[in-house]
Amino acid sequence: MGVAFPVMQSTLPVVLDTLPALKVRRYHGQSKMGNVYCYARMYFLKDSLQLSLCAFERAPDAATRIEFAVGGTEKAFLLLSLSREGATLSRCGGGMPLVLPAPPPAFFSGVDEQGWYWGAQVSLAAPLLAQAGMVPLPREFSAAVFKTRTDEDAFGASFEALPGGEKLAFENFSRFTPARY
């Protein structure tokens, strides 16, 4: 997994578009969606994780998803799945997934020099992060971003998976360390 990447800790809100992006860079299987550019940006606001999830496509259909997985070192993680209708949240790892109340997403869409995009900003509060072993603020955590469709097995991910590899393989997620800038 390499060296852990620093993620900003702040006591004041930060404009998410100014932060580095965790990008979908690898595509696994043949997908109807093609290679859609997608990313997550994040920082800690006190003890909550602030996220921006974005995909560059004009009008996502009902099957398309942006997914973000985040967890501590216990191999438990949260999986946030964002569709045009809203968000779902599950705790994964260590048995059957547990469905949790999803935080309300603040949707956005538009067009820029890269093309049409859509996405949302979401806040994962400390009680939710505790479900993934991330409270108090972790010294290190793991995360991954995915571009998926509910009607196919192919997916885009922020990491390279082995052929036929598992999308939610915690050991493939990128590592991050909270840091005050």
Image (cartoon, rainbow, N blue to C red):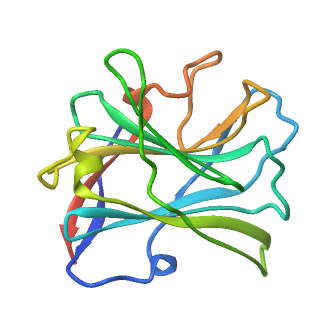
Residue nearest the viewer, comparing 105 with 67: 105
**167 sits left or right of 96 in the view:** right
Residue 5: image x %, image y %? 32, 56
Residue nearest the viewer, comparing 98 with 114: 98
Q: Quadrant of residue 9?
A: bottom left
Residue nearest the viewer, comparing 48 with 86: 86
Query: How many numbered circles are shown?
Result: 0
Q: Is residue 33 above or below residue 52?
A: above
Q: Quadrant of residue 78?
A: top left
Quadrant where the N terminus is found in the figure: top left
**153 sits left or right of 94 in the view:** right
Quadrant where the C terminus is found in the figure: bottom left
Residue 88: image x %, image y %? 53, 44
Residue 18: image x %, image y %? 47, 81
**35 sits left or right of 42 in the view:** right
The residue sitting at the front extreme is 101
Residue at (64, 15) in percent of width and height = 164
The residue sitting at the left extreme is 136
Residue 170: image x %, image y %? 39, 29
Residue at (40, 45) in percent of width and height = 143
Residue at (68, 46) in percent of width and height = 65
Q: Is residue 13 above or below residue 55?
A: below
Residue at (75, 68) in percent of width and height = 117
Q: Quadrant of residue 115?
A: bottom right
**9 sits left or right of 124 in the view:** left
